[in-house]
Each structure stands twice: as structure tokens, then as C-alpha cells.
Amino acid sequence: MEQALRTQLITAVTKELPEDKPRLLQGVGRPDEVLACAEAGVDLFESFFPFQVTERGCALCFDYDVSPDPERAGRAPPAVLELEENRETAVVAQQNGDLNLDERTQMTSFEIDLKDKRYQDDFRPLVEGCGCYCCKNHQRAYMHHLLVTNELLAGVLLMIHNTAHYLGFFRALREALAGDKLDLLKRRVLREGGRQTERKD
Ligand SMILES: [Zn+2]
């Protein structure tokens, strides 16, 4: 469903729902869509998205830090060049992908494809500043090796990082809603990780 129509429907439906009850939306997990739906009044989402990202051998890698304190802003945003490359990879993956595949199985620009050759000698963590077990102990090059050799450990480590990153995004979303910073968070997430036009590219 197009996000504009979805937002319109959610806004109309939530108007009819009791204010004091939480609203759960199923089937939405992309960070850009989560932001739009949360703004339209949704309180709860499912957590399948990090699993889907893990299944395609990718790592979530988008910025959601809206902290004004530079000391806390340990999560350095990925270099612009790298994000542009990610974006190209995502678009190429979409173009080369099986057109019959549901679009939700396609790589999004919120993630990096660790099977890509460019990571075979990249000795940085998946995301600089990430505190998860995977990022603290392993490097992109090792994850690339695990993925191309079909080691089961790849999925375990990726799932640890992707879950931690996704939960961090939701923590930031809750804080942004409480602190009236949703617009700032949206700019951060959409500029660094995804473009609204991405899916039409
Ligand atoms: Zn991590």
C-alpha cells in the first residue's frame, strides 16, 4: 500500500478508536513507514523487520541519533559516499531481483549488504559506536566471510546487531515523541537511511 493512502486510512480509523487504548498495526516495519504510521497515531508495531534484514544477509545501518549532546552522539553517521553506494546497491538489488518477489523481501536503503565484495577487507564494526555484542567483537570483513561461506553464525550475529539497532531506533522514537522532536528524528532517519522516493527508483 502507498504510504500516503495508508496514513490517510490510519488517521481516519484512529479517530474512531478510544483514546486510552493502544493501537497495533501489523505488517509495517520499515523505519520510514514506522515513522509515518507513528505520526498518524499507531502505538505498537511488529518486530519482523530486523529478521527480514538478517535473512537477506544485511545489517541495519541508519542514523537515528537526535541527541544534542555531542558526548552522547557516539553513533557516528556513516560517510556520505558509503550511503550513496548503499543506495545504489539497494536500487541495483531491486532492479536485478526477482520481480515476482514481494517488495518486502528486497533490500532497503536502511541497511548494508555485507555479502558485497567491498566489505571483505573492511575492518570496522557494522555500525561505529553500536554497543551490541556483534559490533563490539567483530568486524564487517568477518561478517562478510561468514556470509559468503554460509556459516550459521552469520545469522546469529546479524540478528543480535539488527535487533539492537531496531530497538535503539524505537527508543529514539519514544524519546522524540515525548520531547517533541519527531520532525528532527524524521529528518535524521530519512536523510541518512532512506528516501521516500526509494521504492519508485
Ligand atoms: Zn551492532
Image (spheres, rainbow, N blue to C red):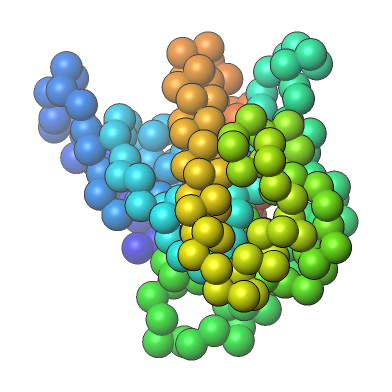
Residue 26, placed above or below residue 151? above
Percent position of residue 80, x then y: 84, 50
Residue 121 located left or right of residue 9: right
Q: Quadrant of the N terminus?
A: bottom left
Residue 129, placed above or below residue 112? above
Residue 18, placed above or below residue 23? above
Percent position of residue 62, x then y: 65, 44
Percent position of residue 87, x then y: 71, 63
Which of the 4 image quadrants contains residue 78? top right
Residue 95 located left or right of residue 144: left
Regarding residue 91, the answer to whether it shows in the image is: no
Q: For this rendering, which residue is in front, 125 or 189? A: 125
Question: Residue at left 68%, top 36%?
Answer: 136
Q: Quadrant of the C terminus?
A: bottom right
Residue 79 located left or right of residue 11: right
Question: Residue at left 47%, top 34%?
Answer: 167
Q: For this rendering, which residue is in front, 127 or 99? A: 127
Q: For this rendering, which residue is in front, 188 or 135? A: 135
Percent position of residue 155, x then y: 50, 59
Question: Residue at left 48%, top 87%?
Answer: 98
